[in-house]
Amino acid sequence: MHGYRYIEGTATLQVDLQRCVACGLCAEVCPHRIFALSAEGLEVKDYDLCMECGACARNCPVQAITVSPGVGCAAALLAPLVNRLLGRKVLSGCC
Ligand code: SF4
Ligand code: SF4
C-alpha cells in the first residue's frame, strides 16, 4: 500500500486541532503515516493518503478525529479478499 493515494480531495478525515492533546497515538497507528507530531503539535501531512481505516479515530483519547470508513475505501479493498478467504459469495465490501 506504500504510495497509495485516494481520489484527490475526497477523504472524510477531519482533525480538531483545538481538541488535540498531542499524544501521538494517531501517528503511531496510522498505516499510511499521514500524521507528523512535532513541538508545534500535530500536522496532517497529506489527507489524500488516508484510506479511511478509522484506526486513528478509534485510538484518539479525546475524540479529536472523525473519519467515515468506507468512502476511502478500505472496506472495498479488504472485504473481497476476506470474503474470498472465508468462501463467501458476496464480494463487494463498500458501504
Ligand atoms: S483513517 Fe486510517 S489511514 Fe486515515 S489517517 Fe486514520 S489511521 Fe491513517
Ligand atoms: S490521537 Fe488525538 S490527541 Fe493524540 S495526537 Fe492524534 S489527534 Fe491528537
Image (cartoon, grey):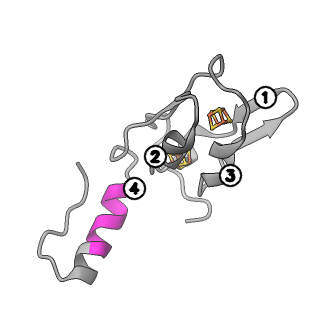
69 part of magenta stretch: no
Q: Are marks 4 and 3 in contact (CB under 8 Å)?
A: no
Whether the residue under disc 4 has CB within 8 Å of ligand 1: yes
Work out whether 15 lies above or below 49. Answer: above
Residue plotted at (47% across, 50% down): 51
Q: Quadrant of the N terminus?
A: bottom right
Residue plotted at (55% across, 44% down): 59
List the residue tagged with mark 1.
41
List the residue tagged with mark 4.
74
80 part of magenta stretch: yes
Question: In this view of the protein, which residue sits in the foreground, 67 or 2?
Answer: 67
Q: Considering the numbered disc 2 on the image, is that residue within a helix, a strand or a loop? A: loop
Indicate the quadrant where residue 81 lies.
bottom left
Whether the residue under disc 2 has CB within 8 Å of ligand 1: yes
Q: Position of residue 45 (x, y in %)?
A: 69, 39
Left or right? Give the position of 43 relative to 1. right
Q: Which mark is residue 28?
A: 3
Give the amino acid at mark 1: Gly
> Between disc 3 and disc 1, whose residue precedes?
3
What are the residue bounds of the magenta stretch? 74-82
Q: Position of residue 19 (x, y in %)?
A: 62, 20
> Between disc 4 and disc 3, whose residue precedes?
3
> Between disc 2 and disc 1, whose residue precedes?
1
Give the amino acid at mark 2: Gly
Q: Position of residue 90 (x, y in %)?
A: 13, 69
Q: Main secondary structure of the magenta part?
A: helix
- C-alpha separation, residue under disc 2 versus residue under disc 1: 21 Å
Whether the residue under disc 3 has CB within 8 Å of ligand 2: no
- C-alpha separation, residue under disc 2 versus residue under disc 4: 9 Å
Q: Which mark is residue 54?
A: 2
Residue plotted at (70% across, 27% down): 21
